[in-house]
Image (spheres, rainbow, N blue to C red):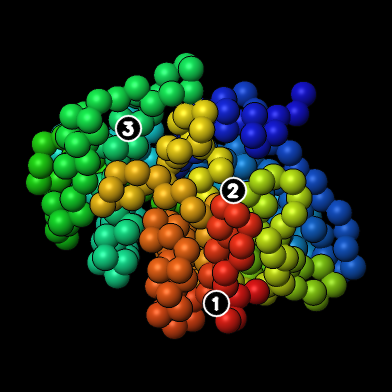
């Protein structure tokens, strides 16, 4: 029995780092291509489908490199997921503070705070109370059953300035606050998984984690990797098909997880209004790292089309493609 990405996400009920489903088998393959083996494996991790493709002179060592990479994904997911009750992030959300934090969490939160400032808080990991409220109040009829008072209370707890980070600790300055690293941690984990592949001799590889993509080197035949940007309407009309050597691409869209039948409320939420922007279908960003591309795509989505495009244009070496709800495509000059 096979399980599609859509079925998997529906089973999860949420798209996010660490929302896991058990009992879904990995799918692996290996084929000789010239003097190398093309080794590929797909697993369900981090709340999405993760496919790793690698080239290696040895089939066995190529498979081992991919196995090590998936081990790194699992290790980091345990540290950064808000869905695992014993993770440092869950401790922070439960107790309002966490000490002795691992270096990886420190790096992700530090980067999140920097991108928050850079984007005038369009990217804000303290959005969790509003996302949680939507999750809780979405009823079986596909309607959002919440009061104005509940909404305003949750929105009042969104405050990037009240997330305090010290050398080995993080605290939330207000009771009831919480953080979600869903918009940045997956990209960080993909970057680290890529580094593991390279360290194990698979220097030519591609990782696709639900639209968070890291490529390194070349695919078989010394050709660039070919990457299609997801069609928000899921009809196969890809907004762009690009060629990549070593690079990073991430796409944020409100088309995967929504909380109401009219798709007005989804997992991308403005920290200012508490609402989900609805004039943008997706934002894809190319950046030096998947972590950065991940967070910048979220920020640009929240800013909406024209402002989001100007934001990415202001950043050297970063490119974006924005697809609006009416199908218009806006892009920076060097995207693709």
Q: Residue at x 34, y 37 (%)?
A: 131
Q: Which image quadrant for residue 137?
A: top left
Q: In what quadrant of the picture does the C terminus appear?
A: bottom right
Is residue 200 at least partly visible in the picture? no
Label 2: few (<14), some or many (≥20) within 10 Å?
many
228 lies left or right of 33: left
State how far apart marks 1 and 3 are (Cα): 34 Å
- From the top left corner, tell me how far across and down residue 61 is, in percent: 71, 56
Disc with the residue nearer the chain's start (2 vs 1): 2
Label 3: few (<14), some or many (≥20) within 10 Å?
some
Disc with the residue nearer the chain's start (1 vs 3): 3
Residue 210, numbered label = 2
252 or 69: which is nearer to us?
A: 252
Q: Residue furthest top?
A: 140
Q: Nearer the viewer, mark 2 or mark 1?
A: 1
Q: In what quadrant of the picture does the N terminus appear?
A: top right
224 or 6: which is nearer to us?
A: 6
Q: Which residue is mark 3?
A: 132
Is residue 126 at least partly visible in the picture? yes
Q: Secondary structure at mark 3?
A: helix
Q: Residue at x 47, y 29 (%)?
A: 260
**For the residues bearing labels 3 and 2, Cβ distance under 8 angstroms:** no
For the image, the number of numbered tags is: 3
State how far apart marks 3 and 2 are (Cα): 22 Å
66 or 180: which is nearer to us?
A: 180
- From the top left corner, tell me how far across and down residue 252 is, in percent: 51, 54
Q: Residue at x 21, y 46 (%)?
A: 158
Q: Nearer the viewer, mark 3 or mark 2?
A: 3
Q: Nearer the viewer, mark 1 or mark 3?
A: 1
- From the top left corner, tell me how far across and down residue 194 is, in percent: 56, 61
Disc with the residue nearer the chain's start (3 vs 2): 3
Q: Which residue is mark 1?
A: 332
């Amino acid at each position: 029995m096979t399980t599609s990405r859509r079925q998997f996400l529906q089973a999860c009920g949420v798209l996010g780092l660490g929302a896991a489903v058990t009992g879904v088998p990995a799918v692996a393959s290996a084929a000789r291509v010239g003097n190398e083996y093309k080794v590929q494996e797909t697993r369900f991790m981090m709340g999405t489908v993760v496919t790793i493709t690698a080239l290696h002179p040895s089939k066995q060592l190529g498979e081992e490199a991919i196995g090590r990479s998936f081990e790194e994904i699992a290790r980091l997911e345990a540290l950064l997921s808000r869905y695992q009750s014993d993770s440092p992030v869950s401790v922070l959300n439960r107790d309002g503070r966490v000490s002795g934090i691992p270096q990886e969490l420190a790096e992700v939160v530090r980067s999140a705070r920097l991108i928050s400032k850079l984007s005038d808080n369009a990217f804000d990991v303290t959005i969790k109370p509003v996302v949680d409220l939507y999750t809780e109040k979405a009823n079986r009829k596909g309607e959002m059953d919440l009061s104005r008072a509940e909404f305003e209370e949750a929105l009042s707890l969104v405050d990037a300035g009240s997330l305090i980070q010290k050398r080995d600790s993080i605290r939330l300055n207000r009771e009831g606050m919480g953080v979600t690293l869903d918009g940045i941690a997956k990209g960080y984990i993909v970057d680290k998984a890529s580094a593991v592949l390279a360290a194990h001799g698979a220097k030519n590889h591609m990782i696709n984690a639900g639209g968070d993509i890291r490529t390194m080197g070349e695919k078989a035949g010394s050709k660039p990797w070919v990457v299609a940007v997801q069609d928000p309407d899921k009809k196969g009309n890809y907004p762009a098909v690009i060629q990549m050597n070593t690079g990073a691409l991430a796409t944020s869209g409100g088309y995967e997880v929504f909380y109401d039948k009219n798709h007005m409320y989804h997992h991308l939420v403005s920290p200012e209004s508490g609402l989900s922007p609805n004039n943008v279908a997706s934002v894809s960003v190319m950046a030096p790292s998947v972590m950065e591309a991940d967070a910048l795509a979220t920020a640009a989505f929240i800013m909406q089309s024209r402002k989001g495009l100007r934001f990415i244009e202001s950043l050297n070496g970063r490119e974006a493609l924005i697809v609006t709800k009416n199908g218009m495509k806006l892009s920076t000059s060097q995207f693709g």
